[in-house]
C-alpha cells in the first residue's frame, strides 16, 4: 500500500478533476495510481458525452468519481485497488441506467434516415417494373436492371439498420460516448454503404462476385427484384466487411 501521490481537486464548475502531485513526494507515481488516474479521466470524458454537465445525473456521478479518486490517489492510506472496484461498479450503474436510452435513440435516428433514403427508391423501382420494356425510355435505359438497383439500395438501408441492432446487443461503458468506432455519422454510413452496395450489385450482374445463400444467388440481382432486395439486406448487415471484400477483390487488378 502506497501513500497517495496526488492532491485531488476539481475545477470551479465541477466538471473535471485536477490531480496535483503532492509537494512532499518525489519521483514517479506508483503504476497503479497512474492507471487509476487515466481510467478516471477516461470515465469523466465518457460522462461528459452521456450527460450535459449541468444535469443532475452528471453532477451526482461526478461527485462519486471525485470521492473515489480521493480514496485511490490521495492521503497517507491511498487504496487504488478499492477505487478501481468502485469505479467499475459506478460504470456498471451508468450503463444500466443510460445504455438503453442511448441505443434506442440511435436506432430511431438511424431507422428514420434509412426509411427516408430507402422508401422512395423502393417505390421508384417498383413503378419501373410496370413500364413497358418496349417504351421509348427502354431504348436508353435497362429498365429491369435500373429497377433492381433501386430495390437493392432500399434493401441495403434496411440491412444497415439491422446491422446495428444485431452487432450492438449490449453496450460497454465506452460505447456510451462513441457508438460507432469508425466515427461515421448515421447519414454518411447509410450513403457510403449504399454506394458500395450499388458497386457490388453491378459486379453481381457481371458475375465479378457471386454470392449464394441456399437457393438464392447474386446472379439473379439483375433479373429478380426480390433477390435484389434480399442481397441489399445482406450487404447492409455486413456493412463493416463489404469495403474490405471489395478492396481485396480489386487490389490484384490495380496492382
Image (cartoon, rainbow, N blue to C red):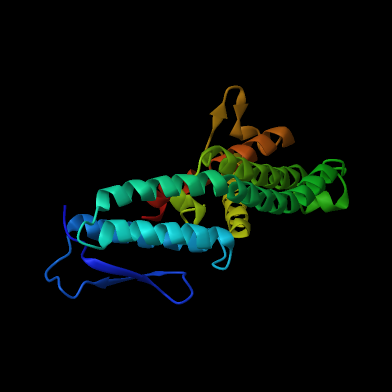
Q: Quadrant of residue 206?
A: top right
- Quadrant of the rendering where the C terminus is positioned: bottom left
In this rendering, would 247 be left or right of 215? left
Give the answer, above or below, for where 127 lies relative to 13.
above
Residue 238: give x, y in percent of width and height.
53, 41
Q: Which residue is pictured at 45% across the width and 77% down the height?
A: 12
Q: Which residue is pictured at 19% across the width and 57% down the height?
A: 31
Nearer to the camera, 71 or 181: 71
Nearer to the camera, 15 or 79: 79
In this rendering, would 104 be left or right of 124? left
Residue 249: give x, y in percent of width and height.
44, 45
Residue 94: give x, y in percent of width and height.
50, 49
Q: Which residue is pictured at 57% across the width and 27% down the height?
A: 213
Q: Is residue 42 visible?
A: no
Q: Is residue 196 visible?
A: yes
Q: Residue furthest top?
A: 215
In this rendering, would 203 be left or right of 39? right
Nearer to the camera, 246 or 172: 172
Q: Quadrant of residue 164?
A: top right
Amino acid at each position: 500500500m502506497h501513500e497517495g501521490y496526488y492532491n485531488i481537486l476539481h475545477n470551479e464548475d465541477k466538471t473535471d478533476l485536477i490531480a496535483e502531485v503532492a509537494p512532499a513526494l518525489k519521483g514517479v507515481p506508483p503504476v497503479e495510481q497512474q492507471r487509476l488516474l487515466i481510467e478516471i479521466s477516461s470515465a469523466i470524458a465518457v460522462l461528459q458525452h452521456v450527460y450535459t454537465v449541468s444535469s443532475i445525473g452528471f453532477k451526482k456521478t461526478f461527485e462519486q468519481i471525485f470521492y473515489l479518486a480521493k480514496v485511490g490517489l490521495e492521503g497517507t492510506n491511498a487504496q487504488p485497488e478499492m477505487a478501481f472496484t468502485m469505479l467499475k461498479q459506478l460504470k456498471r450503474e451508468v450503463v444500466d441506467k443510460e445504455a438503453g436510452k442511448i441505443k434506442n435513440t440511435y436506432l430511431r435516428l438511424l431507422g428514420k434516415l434509412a426509411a427516408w433514403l430507402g422508401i422512395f427508391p423502393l417505390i421508384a423501382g417498383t413503378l419501373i417494373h410496370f413500364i413497358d420494356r418496349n417504351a421509348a425510355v427502354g431504348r436508353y435505359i435497362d429498365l429491369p436492371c435500373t429497377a433492381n438497383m433501386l430495390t437493392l439500395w432500399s434493401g441495403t438501408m434496411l440491412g444497415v439498420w439491422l446491422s446495428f441492432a444485431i452487432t450492438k446487443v449490449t453496450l460497454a461503458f465506452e460505447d456510451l460516448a462513441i457508438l460507432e468506432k469508425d466515427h461515421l455519422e448515421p447519414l454518411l454510413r447509410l450513403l457510403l454503404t449504399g454506394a458500395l452496395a450499388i458497386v457490388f450489385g453491378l459486379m453481381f450482374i457481371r458475375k465479378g462476385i457471386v454470392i449464394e445463400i441456399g437457393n438464392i444467388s447474386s446472379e439473379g440481382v439483375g433479373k429478380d427484384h426480390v433477390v435484389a432486395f434480399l442481397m441489399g439486406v445482406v450487404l447492409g448487415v455486413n456493412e463493416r466487411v463489404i469495403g474490405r471484400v471489395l478492396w481485396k477483390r480489386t487490389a490484384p487488378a490495380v496492382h
